[in-house]
Amino acid sequence: MNQASSIRKPTNQRNIVLIIISLSSFISAFSGSSIIVAAPIMGAELQMDAATLSWFVTIFILATALLQIPFGKIADLYGRKKIYFIGMLIFTSATLALGFANSANSLLSFRFVQGIGAALVFATGTAILTSVFPANEKGKAFGYNIGAVYFGLTIGPSLGGVLTQHLGWRSIFYVTASLALIVALLIVWKLKGEWTSEIKEPFDYIGSLIYVSTLFLLLYGFKVLPKYPGYIMIGGSIICAGTFVLWERRIDNPILELRLFKKNKFFTFANLSAFAFYTSTSAVSFLLSLYLQSVKGFTPQQTGLILLARPIVQAILSPIGGRLSDFIEHKTITTIGVGIGFVSLLLLTFLNENSHISLIIASLALGGLGFGLFSSPNANSIMSSVSKRFFGVASALIGTMRTIGQTLSLGIVTLIFAVLIGDTSSESPEYAAKLLESSKIAFIIFTSLCTIAVVFSFLRGKMNQLKELDKSEVSH
């Protein structure tokens, strides 16, 4: 099915596609956020130490980051609906299996497989929306889809807590698997047609292997910092990245068309701004959670309620921001969004032991407002700046920028903690002071990175400068 025929679909059929894609986005977000509350009980039952339990989160992120670009390319070549459906089946099966896991190893294994399924879904969902909705409605579609993500993040912890308390932690996986199965059935029943590139070409297996190796070494390296192997892995990832660039430039059918970045500054700076913005903001909730409990003495429940300020605002504003991007220059609205995010981070650089809770809430609300005005319009920017043969790769790149940014953000915090806090126990009288010092340094670094994100967002240019790329524009 080509793009032209897709956008002639009746409005009700397009809305069905939006509902299906948004449901899958909600489920993936809910799956990750709901289990956080149950993690201590789950870890105790399966005798998992803190390091192993942290891998439960990391291994999912690792799987999604590694595989989105390769499967985005596969979806472009062989069908986006097909890959999307396979992804939902894998996600559903792995989620159900997690509910029956009886050891740490089985839990981590099924979690990795769940991440593989999520990678296939993430790599194709936005591409399908782009194929179905006309240009003047793409922002609206992206807005509702991203709003569904933040809604899942918002209700996940509270609903996960209720399920864990009354039905046990395994019930979270059973509920999630049931919802995912419904989406899989809706794909078969309601998602009509197929979306694929009209140009068939061989798949770049060698490039995919180098790409996966590059990201694995980078993300795993940041995970084990500041231990010595971490630096070796990051160095290895730089070598692999150079090798990947050389390989992709010399072959006719690369997995990631690097000339997109060279010839299309709208596409390039939209991705760079996303990467810088996610890197500068992803660890904020983690730092504030520690600050509120260890410095201010709030309970976990009180802390959780305070931290809801950002995702609630994000969930409300994302559809509005997406809709605005259908009528306002992307550069304008995304730069305003990142600028508001900068202000929210700047407020946190003044954080001290006597700071009022209103400062935290104001910062979180501003952060949610910034993301609400940035995420959907920026996705619209990326997907609107490439020709339809690259929709799958572009869709996957959106998720990859987010995932790498999140990982590096937490990696920066981990490195700062290792240097300034070290082995200091959380029960030590010195811990709160060291945590506060570390957090302030992190917020200064993140504010600086957000400044770069503002510059990148502005440099993308205007929509009327866009030229849809065709094969001749990216040919060798």
Image (tube, grey):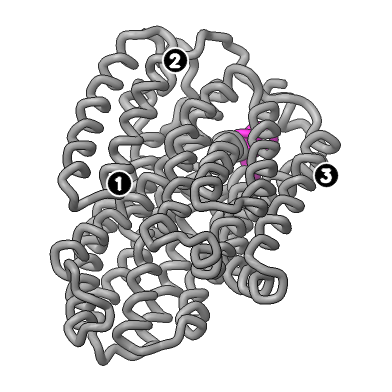
Numbered tag placed on residue 12 in the rendering: 3
CB of mark 1 within 8 Å of CB of mark 3? no
Q: Give whichever of discs 1 and 3 has the lower sequence position.
A: 3
Write the residue at 31% across / 58% down: 280
The answer to whether residue 462 is left or right of residue 152 is: left
| Secondary element type, mark 2 | helix
Q: Which residues are magenta?
A: 127-137
Considering depth in this image, is 381 or 301 the residue closer to the camera?
301
Q: Which residue is mark 2?
A: 205
Q: Residue at x 24, y 71 (%)?
A: 439
Residue 171: in magenta span: no
Mark 3, Cα crowd under 10 Å, few <14 / some 14-19 / many 20+, is few
Label 1 to label 3, Cα distance in Å? Answer: 37 Å
Q: Is residue 133 magenta?
A: yes
Relative to 111, say whether 265 is above or below. Answer: above
Per the rendering, the mark at residue 456 is 1
Of the pair 153 and 298, the residue shown nearer to us? 298
Where, by quadrant of the figure, is residue 424 drawn?
bottom left
Labels 3 and 2: the sequence-earlier one: 3
Quadrant assignment for the N terminus:
top right
| In this rendering, position of residue 411 left or right of residue 198 | left
Q: Amino acid at mark 1?
A: Phe
Q: Residue at x 23, y 37 (%)?
A: 233
Vertical comparison of 250 with 180: above or below: above
Residue 272 in the image: state x and y as whole percent: 33, 42
Amino acid type, mark 2: Tyr
